[in-house]
Amino acid sequence: MSTERMIQKSTQFIDKCVELNFVSAQDAEMLRKPIGKEGHVVAQDALQRGLLAPSDIEIVQSLLRPLEVVPGYEILDFVGRGGMGVVYRARQLNLERVVALKTVLVSSVGDSNTAARFELEAKALARLQHPNIVQALNFGKHEGRFYFAMEFISGPSCEQLVASGFGLPKSQVWQIVRQVASGLLHASRQGLIHRDIKPANLLLMPAPEGSLAATVNNGIVKIADFGLAMFTDHAQQDNRLTTADKIIGSPAFMSPEQFSGGELDYRADMYSLGATAWNLLFGEIPFKGSSIGALYKQKQNPSEIAQNLPTTLTDSQWRLLMGLLDPDRERRPSSYEMLIDAIDQLDAGETTSQTAEFSLGDIVVNVPAISEEPTVERDRETEEQSSPANLPTAEYPKRTSWESVSGVAKGKIGVGETQGKPSLLRPSAEAKKSGSVRGSWNRRVAFGLVALFALFVLVGGIKWGRRPTRGPRELNRVISNEPLYDGKSLTGWRVDGSMDGAWNTVEAPDSSEAIACTDNTGAITRRLPKTDFFRVSLFVWVQDGGGVVDIDFANDFALQADVRGTLRIDAGEAILGTKNGDYDEVSVYNRVPLPPRFSERYHVVYIERQKTDWYVFLEQDLIGTIPISQLPESSAIRVVVHGSDLEAGSESAGGSDVVPRVFFSDFQLSKLAEEVSADEPE
């Protein structure tokens, strides 16, 4: 290829990346500088710098050669991507019609499990002919890439309708639920369970002229994404495409029985439809646990989530909704026919009962309005965690007030008789007769209280004086999610030559896949996509003997000596501060004790970039904040292990003969925005 042609193709590649918001304008200029140099490949350069993932590169290349991806189809636009593949808007050339073309990424085809699921989705949809299910059109394989052509739905998803955090009109919601139930009834009669019903997989299209379905404000509902579908006749599939200790689905919406990996039937989808109905009615998902264990615990007591919801339901609506969300599938509607009949009998004009009435309240939604893609999650032991909606607010713990100081003083003085002596708060009769004694006593008490208060202020000043003034934690609404770890490889990690030590994907003690260092010390970096305000969440498991573990942020880590923020887990403490190198000492901002039995399970860490400060949480407990002004503007995450006692054993980690003691998993980036008031346009 001539130099001119190579420069042209490289420039087109970068321009398309910018158009898709895969790279920033600043990063694009950095990629343009070496164009034209001998041996330089812009896609490889972007991958090595951590600016693009392999899936990003494939999307860009597909859009730049639209007629070469799948024979007989022309790629028009990029629509989206999920856990298994990419969806494009494409033109079927021989019939000149627009279709949705889904392809399995080349980087994933090597996984036979992924390819099998993709083929299963095509076969599952091919069996279904229903107005509320996306229609399958074609399936095949070309040059190692599976493709699947489907009916293209131009309308929004139900997820997009509630992305602002506000619910839909009740009559519209129940019409949507009825249509989905109708489609699932058809699927169940064909022996299929969807297993991933959620708002993102429910698409809307205009109803045909004159159709009764026009009573639904946004038209006809189409169920999409049968990628996790399961045949109830196990002889017809290979079989589950999963193992007994894995969970498949979207945890916030899936039924409790899906967590255990046991036998499933159509009532699993019915539960997910109930969770979806809740999301559409109230603008938020019903269960917001930050881990599998927390979610499972919440799902066992669904009545506890009906607090301060921003709408009211009639008796019949409330009974139907909670019936769908019953953790015991035997108490859910016994058939889709019964569910449809119950919806048809709902009386929109029924008087709202006291038990069904919810007071208005401001709901802080820390769970994405745009929910996570289907993932393979671990089956963890139930964890004693509260909902992420209860994450600490922007205020520091209050300093001791005058009232609390007075309370302490009273507690020390005592009320009533003590050891047979008159209480100081009950002066003797002589004292009662003497105004001077009473006045002297009052002055002494007042002086003591003032002195005690001054002591508290002094101690408080020492304790809190070192903490920088922080800005408010205003950004709570999650508008999108992006996984930072694919659960099976180090794709997107090890960039800029910044990996130290040997790292690999290994099996954690709970049989999940995790990232771990197989050396005594090591560090590895993951660049973050360009965004202003975000939350990085990750799970970390530090077993006994794991040594010191750091989770570093606010740096690109290309220059090891640059200052960075860090959360250090060491010697029974979580320490927030800054440091200048992987293994340096930490300048402490705050420190808190670790929860009991910390080494026995995974724990979730949240790192948020708010408007003026970085906020760091362990589980739902605020560790502290660091002003953004005190850290670099660069954005990446780096995990560091130093001093781990690696255990010799028969299990190996990527060919090593040692078993790591520290595991990282479930990395995710969530873009944050301010809550939108009902009176304001989004």
Image (cartoon, grey):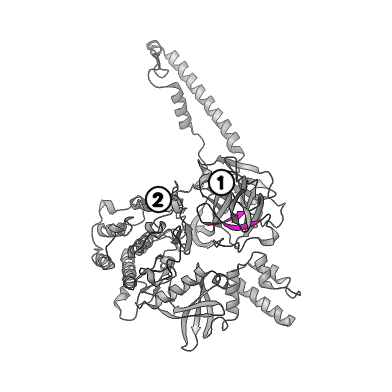
Q: Could you tell me which residue is drawn at 53 percent across and 60 percent down? A: 671
Labels 2 and 1: the sequence-earlier one: 2
Give the mark toward the camera: 2 or 1: 1
Residue 81 is at least partly visible in this image = no
Tell which of 324 and 425 is nearer to you.
324
Residue that lies at the very extreme toward the bottom in this rendered image: 94
Q: Quadrant of residue 277?
A: bottom left
**Could you tell me how far apart the alpha carbons at marks 2 and 1 are, in whole angstroms?**
24 Å
Label 2's element?
Answer: helix
Q: Which residues are magenta?
A: 500-519
Task: Please state the horizontal and vertical placement of residue 232, each as a whole percent of the image.
Answer: 35, 68
Task: Please state the horizontal and vertical placement of residue 641, each as a whole percent of the image.
Answer: 63, 49
Quadrant where the N terminus is found in the figure: bottom right
For label 1, the crowd category at 10 Å Cα-Cα, with few meaning under 14, some 14 to 19 and many 20 or more, is many
Report whether 165 appears left or right of 497.
left
Residue that lies at the very extreme toward the top in this rendered image: 430
For label 2, the crowd category at 10 Å Cα-Cα, with few meaning under 14, some 14 to 19 and many 20 or more, is some
Residue 341 is at least partly visible in this image = yes
Label 1's element?
Answer: loop
18 is within the stretch colored magenta: no
Tell which of 589 and 322 is nearer to you.
322
Mark 2 residue type: Lys
Residue receiving disc 1: 543
Residue receiving disc 2: 297
Mark 1 residue type: Gln
Tell which of 467 and 109 is nearer to you.
109
Q: Could you tell me which residue is drawn at 27 percent across and 68 percent down? A: 340
Residue that lies at the very extreme toward the front in this rendered image: 650
